[in-house]
C-alpha cells in the first residue's frame, strides 16, 4: 500500500478545502497566539504603587507648596477652591489630574513618604525642600 504525500492531498473540513500551506499557516498562527497567552500568564500584574512617578506627574513643588497643605485641611477640596487660595495653581495644566493623584497619595497614607522623597530631591529649590521637612 502506497502512502499519499500530505502535501498533495488537500484536507477537507466542513466542506472547505485547505492546502497544506494554509494549514501550516493556520497552525503557526495558533502557536503564536498560544505563545502570547503564555507570556501574559507569566507576567505578574503591577500592583505596586510607584510613588515617585506619582510625584513627578503632580510636580513635587506643587505637591509641597499647594496640594499637601490643601489636602491636609480637607481631602475633598475642589481644584477651584485650591485655585482661589493659591492663584499659582490656576496656571497649572491638568489641575484635576494633579489633585486626583495627590488624593491617591493621601488615601494610601503615603503623604509622609512623599514628603521624605521630596526632601531628598536634589532638583528642587532649598525653600521647597525646607517646606517639605515641616
Image (cartoon, helix red, strand yellow):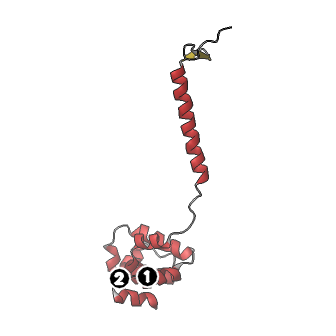
Which residue is at the far front? 1
Q: Nearer the viewer, residue 73 or 123?
A: 123
Find residue 95 and report its horizontal and vertical position in percent. 39, 70
Which image quarter: residue 121? bottom left
Residue 129 % position (x, y): 39, 87
User: Considering the numbered disc 1 on the image, is that residue within a helix, a strand or a loop?
Assistant: helix
Which label number is shown at residue 124? Answer: 2
Residues tagged 2 and 1 counted as in contact (Cβ below 8 A):
yes
Crowd tier of the residue under label 2, counting other residues whose Cα lies within 10 Å: few below 14, some 14–19, many 20 or above: few
The image quadrant where one finds the N terminus is top right
Q: Which residue is mark 1?
A: 118
**How busy is the neighbourhood of tag 1: few (under 14 within 10 Å), some, or many (20 plus)?**
many
Does 86 sit left or right of 17 as displayed? Answer: left
Which corner quadrant of the image does residue 2 belong to?
top right
Give the residue drawn at x 47%, y 74%. Answer: 102
Q: Nearer the viewer, residue 2 or 60?
A: 2
- Picture mark count: 2
* Residue 58 falls in image quadrant: bottom left
Residue pictured at 57% horizontal, 74% vertical: 108
- Which structural element holds mark 2? loop
CA separation in Å, label 2 and label 1: 8 Å
| Image location (x, y in percent) of residue 14 | 62, 17
Q: Residue at x 41, y 69 (%)?
A: 57
Q: Position of residue 59 (x, y in %)?
A: 39, 74
Looking at the image, is mark 2 or mark 1 earlier in the sequence? 1
Amino acid at each position: 500500500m502506497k502512502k499519499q504525500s500530505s502535501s498533495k492531498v488537500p484536507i477537507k473540513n466542513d466542506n472547505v478545502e485547505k492546502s497544506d500551506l494554509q494549514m501550516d499557516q493556520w497552525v503557526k498562527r495558533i502557536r503564536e497566539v498560544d505563545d502570547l497567552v503564555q507570556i501574559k500568564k507569566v507576567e505578574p500584574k503591577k500592583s505596586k504603587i510607584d510613588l515617585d512617578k506619582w510625584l513627578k506627574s503632580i510636580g513635587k513643588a506643587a505637591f509641597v507648596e499647594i496640594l499637601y497643605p490643601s489636602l491636609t485641611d480637607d481631602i475633598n477640596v475642589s481644584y477651584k477652591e485650591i485655585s482661589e487660595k493659591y492663584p499659582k495653581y490656576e496656571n497649572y495644566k491638568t489641575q484635576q489630574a494633579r489633585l486626583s493623584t495627590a488624593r491617591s497619595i493621601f488615601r494610601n497614607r503615603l503623604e509622609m513618604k512623599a514628603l521624605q522623597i521630596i526632601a531628598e530631591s536634589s532638583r528642587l529649590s532649598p525653600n521647597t525642600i525646607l517646606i517639605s521637612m515641616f
